[in-house]
Amino acid sequence: MARFLTDPRVRESVLHPDGASTAGASDIPPPVLRQLRSLDPARTSMFSQLLIVNRLGKIVEGLPCTAWALGARLWEVVRLYNLMCPPNNPKKYNEAVSFCSFLAETPNVAQSAPPWLMDVVGYERSVLEMRFQAQLALPLGPGADSPRDDAVGQMRPQLSPAVRVCLFDHDIEEVLSAFAQGQPKASPTRRPMWLLLQVESDGKVQQDEISAPVVSLLELCTGSATLDEIIGSLASELVIDGDDEVFVSECLSMVRTLLDRGILTLDPDPARRDVPPPRGVPPPCR
């Protein structure tokens, strides 16, 4: 039924069985085929167009910056999406995520789109997924028990499930700023950009650009290594003396900040054996 509404070739073969097209009609059960052939072709065509408009509205609402990036080609791309990907879930979230997958799997569909399109697609998809799927991890607030100084080294930090780290090829914040201000699409700075996204208890997603050393620290926070071990591994990666007091102090300060913000959670029991599987930093948002 979905193909009947989204594919004009299928509609032609069903509504005009004597025509040249036979695409899809043979896959429809005879009782359903007889019902479909009783429909008015003009009204059926109008309904199919309304279906595209409905899907377009969900995509624009769920992925506003992606729609802006596609510009005048949006309608053409959505029509092709409607043809190739029949609807299987009416919710806005599912439609938007499905459209992101379509763009990622069909790289030539937006040949005239800006080169930073997939950065925008990855960003907006990540925000949507975090808002609808992430388990919220609240930060240590006033009155919560912070780890004692003499116990910090044996803690096992891990990345909160409410956090995602994304790598982009362009300065995504320049793109988002131009979109928010209604400016014409321009060429953002091309550079590797790490962005930390964190969904808060009210559903808003906070974002911060982070440096490569911070990414390296977060990658080591899998819940299986102690903080002392993590600092040692990070020192080796950065070719720094692991006993350097300044370096150790900066690492501890950074971890406390990440803990206070709920970006990291800490296992308070150094003897715990049921350590969860390593999570680390998710794959880049591409």
Image (cartoon, rainbow, N blue to C red):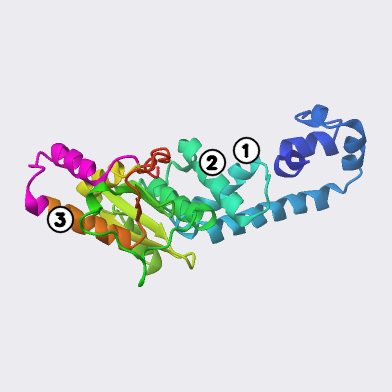
261 in the magenta segment = no
**Which of pointers 1 and 2 lies earlier in the amino acid sequence?**
1
Q: Residue 279 placed where, x, y %? A: 39, 41
Amino acid on which disc 3 is placed: Glu
Give the position of the N terminus as an image quadrant.
top right
Q: Residues within 10 Å of mark 3 (few under 14, many from 20)?
A: few
The answer to whether residue 172 is above or below residue 10 is: below
Q: Identify which residue, 19 or 50, lies in the foreground.
A: 50
Q: Which residues are magenta?
A: 224-247
Q: Residues within 10 Å of mark 2 (few under 14, many from 20)?
A: some
Amino acid on which disc 1 is placed: Met
In whole angstroms, how far apart are the C-alphas of marks 3 and 1?
52 Å
**Which of pointers 2 and 3 lies earlier in the amino acid sequence?**
2
Q: Which residue is mark 3?
A: 250
Q: Residue at x 39, y 45 (%)?
A: 285
- Report the disc number at residue 102: 2
